[in-house]
Amino acid sequence: MSTGDAFLVLSAFLASGVEFVEALTIVLAAGLARGWRSALAGLGAATVVLAVIVAALGPALTKIPIDALRLVVGALLLVFGLQWLRKAILRASGYKALHDEDAIFARELAEAEGAAHVERAGVDWYGFTLAFKGVLLEGLEVVFIVLTFGSAQGSIPLAAAGAAAALVLVAGVGVAVRAPLARVPENATKFAVGVMLTTFGIFWSVEGAGADWPGGDAALLGVLGFVVLFSFLFVRLLRRERRTQLRTAEAQA
Amino acid sequence: MNWLRRFGRFWWDFVIGDDWLVAACVAIAIGATAALAAADIAAWWVLPLAVPLVLWLSLRRAIRSA
């Protein structure tokens, strides 16, 4: 397995894992508050929609010339990765609240328990739509990552294998504990995913635009190191600035 | 029309996200890379230079608007 392939599997595993943890929280809240029948029906319906999207887009992507594909995929991944990285840096430096799966679960549960009961086709409509929307939205990100990473690296099955491993792990632990996976280091994982998406985005955008990397594929490691370096530098700078702001506010109070 | 607007809004939020400036700067940087590459000038350095600058700008914007 090449360095690129190993990164591909790892990136798909981490990115999908984070999304699956979030989807699990929503399905658990829907199931516990509104009944498992409606939550599982929503989960099943969203899975079917996602499977149709993969079946339609997957083969189509493999027909696009690799340079054009890498340009489009690289640009999308770069924009997507910078969104993740921006949020992760703001969280790590204290400017944005950390992602708290327990708090999100409590909020979803309270909202689901308070909603009116409307039954359609034998299922509770609120529970169904809550699970359906949650799984579809989180799943779309997984589909996007698996298809774009996989097609640009030339192996959708490898990316799918990384995502499938994450699904088995998250679903297995979720069924075993029947509680949100609050102990998953989600903030650190999101930081890592942001770094990887940005790295692949830079690498493929440059290749897709017709430029060559010095050192060929080995440059991917250099890009990764560079992205890690400036990301940590930004966290450090912003953390220091945040501490100074808090100290000044305390002194003035 | 309302459905179409919501559909467009969803994809805008999904792809572009909170800061459109990032997407705009990335598009400009990729365009500059392609233009330099087409003129047979080494262009691999454009994105590694642009990305940290864009990210820093976007972070400052997020902090200012918080």
Image (cartoon, coloured by chain):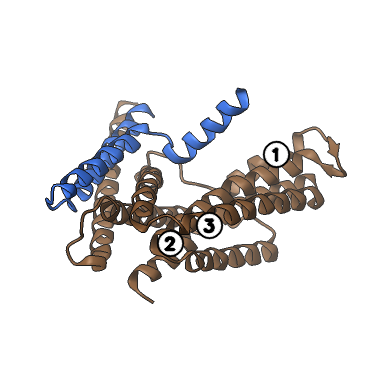
Which badge, 2 or 1, comes first in the chain's sequence?
A: 2
Which badge, 1 or 3, comes first in the chain's sequence?
A: 3
Label 2 is placed on what type of residue?
Ser
Q: Position of residue A195 (x, y in %)?
A: 35, 55
Label 1 is placed on what type of residue?
Ala
Q: Position of residue A97 (x, y in %)?
A: 45, 41
Q: Which chain is brown?
A: A
Which residue is found at the position 75% from the left and 53% from the top?
A40
Which residue is found at the position 28% from the left and 31% from the top?
A248
Label 3 is placed on what type of residue?
Gly
Q: Which residue is mark 2?
A: A11
> For the residue labelled by badge 1, is the local secondary structure a helix, a strand or a loop?
helix
Q: Which residue is mark 3?
A: A58
Q: Which chain is blue?
A: B
Quadrant of the snapshot with the C terminus of chain A:
top left
| Distance from Cα at disc 2 to Cα at disc 1 | 34 Å
